[in-house]
Amino acid sequence: MILTNERSFFRRWFSQERLRQSLRNLQSTGIVHSTLELPAFFFYVLSPEKAIDLLIKTKVQETQEIQHGKKEMLTLWQIPDYR
């Protein structure tokens, strides 16, 4: 499957900027790669199952980071008592 900025099925559903952002996010996770030529061609590297597993792993890590920072976040949100 090859995705291009010009002929992509997804172009009908996303604005061009949202498409670029989505493709950049997929590139940063290693799910898709692009060519250097213009217009750029995007192609997937992983199988759909591996891509979903990678996305799940990323979301789990993000959730764990938030949980570890919970106490600090609550401290920052406290309103000082000026009585």
Image: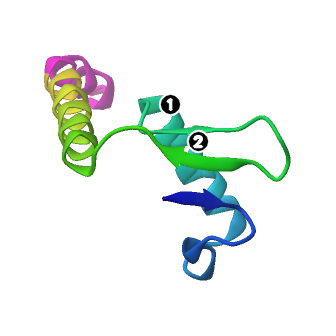
Picture residue at 14% right of the left edge, 26% below the top: 67
The residue at which mark 1 appears reads as 28
Crowding at dot 2, Cα within 10 Å, few <14 / some 14-19 / many 20+, comes out as some
Q: On the rendered structure, is 15 left or right of 29?
A: right
The foreground one among 4 and 62 is 4
Tell me if label 1 and label 2 are in contact, CB under 8 Å. yes
Looking at the picture, how far across and down is residue 62, in whole percent? 25, 30
The residue at which mark 2 appears reads as 24
Give, as a three-letter code, the residue at label 1.
Answer: Ser
Can you say whether 38 is above or below 69 in the image?
Answer: below
Looking at the picture, how far across and down is residue 1, in whole percent? 48, 59
Q: Is residue 74 rendered magenta in the image?
A: yes
The foreground one among 54 and 74 is 54
Q: Is residue 67 rendered magenta in the image?
A: no
Can you say whether 9 is above or below 66 in the image?
Answer: below
Can you say whether 10 is above or below 64 in the image?
Answer: below
Q: On the rendered structure, is 22 left or right of 69?
A: right
Q: On the rendered structure, is 28 left or right of 49?
A: right
Picture residue at 61% right of the left edge, 82% below the top: 12
Crowding at dot 1, Cα within 10 Å, few <14 / some 14-19 / many 20+, comes out as few
Q: Which residues are magenta?
A: 68-81
Classify mark 1: helix, strand or loop: helix
The foreground one among 24 and 77 is 24
Picture residue at 42% right of the left edge, 31% below the top: 29
Looking at the picture, how far across and down is residue 40, in whole percent? 75, 48
